[in-house]
Image: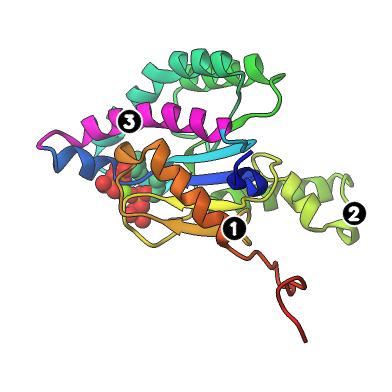
């Protein structure tokens, strides 16, 4: 067991960024970058699970990304449709439980049905959960949770005196443990509306590397950095500090 194994983040969230620039800076299209990025989602998640993490949330398309040029949005939507079968095969091969988080408004019935099938077919796998955040926005998720709570309150299904962090968490798109480590590729130092509730005490790691170039080795360097962080959660590390 390496020293890395001693401190493995249980839930890792990744903001997949820099795909478009990866393409254009190679004289290719932004779309080429999206395609390459997708390949890396599989490669990297396989490696991260092998390193002992149990939950990965990947931010692939945001509620705000719908503002982009129609052609780019359509390309990404079609890429997803094309790749859903691939995702199912990958999930079976690696025994991964797949989840999808996001608003479904802009997705076709066929995409929604296929997503549901993937979730249903992989629901019994345990130990590795891959949460694809597609059409996802954290504000939308929190508003949707608030609406569900209001509805349950109206139907006498929830007592407001009992509403605490765990119960609120159960109204989010997925009931997952908090994020321990958030990684953003592509050089921007911002959160862009990703999992704002879930990352309240996450360690943050920003890298300039574009997502399609972010390798297993780059990830291992992040893990080493993570093991050096002192996670205090508002307390004091008694082992290190004397009065
Ligand atoms: C991330 O790559 C994937 C999506 C947000 C869809 P980008 O498409 O944002 O790539 P850059 O940041 O423009 O290079
Ligand atoms: C964040 O990337 C969204 C996803 C990775 C899906 P963006 O490229 O959309 O973020 P901004 O616009 O630079 O903040
Ligand atoms: Mg971007």
Name which residue lies at 23% across and 32% down.
Answer: 31
Quadrant that contains the C terminus: bottom right
| Residue 156 vs residue 83, the one in the foreground | 83
Question: In 3D space, how far apart are the residues under numbered discs 1 and 3 (Cα atoms)?
Answer: 29 Å
Q: Which residue is mark 3?
A: 76
Badge 2 or badge 3: first in the primary sequence: 3
Q: Quadrant of residue 227?
A: bottom right
Q: Which residue is mark 2?
A: 159
Confirm whether the magenta stretch covers residue 30.
yes
Q: Which residues are magenta?
A: 27-50
Closer to the camera: disc 1 or disc 3?
1
* Residue 202: image tag: 1
Ligand 1 within 8 Å of disc 3? The answer is yes
Name which residue lies at 69% across and 29% down.
Answer: 127
Confirm whether the magenta stretch covers residue 137.
no
SS class of the residue under badge 3? helix
Closer to the camera: disc 2 or disc 1?
1
């Amino acid at each position: 067991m390496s020293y890395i194994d001693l401190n493995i983040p249980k839930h890792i969230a990744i903001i997949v960024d820099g795909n478009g620039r990866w393409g254009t800076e190679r004289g290719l299209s932004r779309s080429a970058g999206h395609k390459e990025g997708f390949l890396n989602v599989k490669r990297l998640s396989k490696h991260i699970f092998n390193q002992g993490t149990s939950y990965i949330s990947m931010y692939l398309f945001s509620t705000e990304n719908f503002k982009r040029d129609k052609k780019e949005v359509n390309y990404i939507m079609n890429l997803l449709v094309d790749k859903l079968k691939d995702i199912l095969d990958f999930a079976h091969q690696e025994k991964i439980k797949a989840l999808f988080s996001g608003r479904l408004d802009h997705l076709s019935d066929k995409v929604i049905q296929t997503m549901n099938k993937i979730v249903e077919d992989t629901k019994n796998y345990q130990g590795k959960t891959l949460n694809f955040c597609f059409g996802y926005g954290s504000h939308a998720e929190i508003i949707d949770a608030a609406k569900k709570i209001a509805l349950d309150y109206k139907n006498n299904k929830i007592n407001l005196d009992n509403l605490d962090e765990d119960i609120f968490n159960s109204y989010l798109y997925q009931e997952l443990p908090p994020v321990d480590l958030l990684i953003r590729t592509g050089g921007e130092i911002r959160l862009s509306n990703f999992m704002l509730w879930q990352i309240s005490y996450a360690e943050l790691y920003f890298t300039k590397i574009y997502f399609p170039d972010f390798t297993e080795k780059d990830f291992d360097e992040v893990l080493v950095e993570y093991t050096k962080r002192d996670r205090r959660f508002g307390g004091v590390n008694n082992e290190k500090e004397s009065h």
